Image (tube, rainbow, N blue to C red):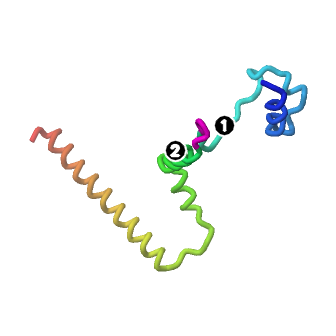
């Protein structure tokens, strides 16, 4: 690591991490759980990295969690639309569960 990179890295280091702590081998550091999504930008291709990050956010459910934690006011008409969609999703899920249960019962009985 050259001196410029070392100087840049010192900016990102935690302020609580002093000289004595930086001399301790990495195996003795306590492990902290890192939350979030990390995406590497390869060859300066930022557009690809952003689309990849968006796909990862959608698949991990972070996007739904952010939308659910809305702090602004939701109009009554929007609430009705969301309630209807949730009800449709619930009924569809129950219908699918009922169909699967009947299929399993038929297989168990040997019909």
Residue at mark 2: 52
Q: Nearer the viewer, residue 82 or 104?
A: 82
Q: Badge 2 local density, few (<14 within 10 Å), some, or many (20+)? A: some
Q: Nearer the viewer, residue 105 or 80?
A: 80
Give the image quarter of residue 105: top left
Q: Nearer the viewer, mark 2 or mark 1?
A: 2
Task: Say whether residue 66 is magenta.
Answer: no
Residue at mark 1: 33
Q: Nearer the viewer, residue 29 or 40?
A: 40
Q: Secondary structure at mark 1?
A: loop
Q: Nearer the viewer, residue 7 or 56?
A: 7
Q: Position of residue 34 (x, y in %)?
A: 66, 39
Total marks in image: 2
Quarter of the image for the C terminus: give it. top left
Left or right of 58? Residue 9 is: right
Q: Which residues are magenta?
A: 40-45
Q: Main secondary structure of the magenta part?
A: loop
Q: Residue furthest bottom?
A: 76
Left or right of 60? Residue 12 is: right
Q: Position of residue 97 (x, y in %)?
A: 28, 52
């Amino acid at each position: 690591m050259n001196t410029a990179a070392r100087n840049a890295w010192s900016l990102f280091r935690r302020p609580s991490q002093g000289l004595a702590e930086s001399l301790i081998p990495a195996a003795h550091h306590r492990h902290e759980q890192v939350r979030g999504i990390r995406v590497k930008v390869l060859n300066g291709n930022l557009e690809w990295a952003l689309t990849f990050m968006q796909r990862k956010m959608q698949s991990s459910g972070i996007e739904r969690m952010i939308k659910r934690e809305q702090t602004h006011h939701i109009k009554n008409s929007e609430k009705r639309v969301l309630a209807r969609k949730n009800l449709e999703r619930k009924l569809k899920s129950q219908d699918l569960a009922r169909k699967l249960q009947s299929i399993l019962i038929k297989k168990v009985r040997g019909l």
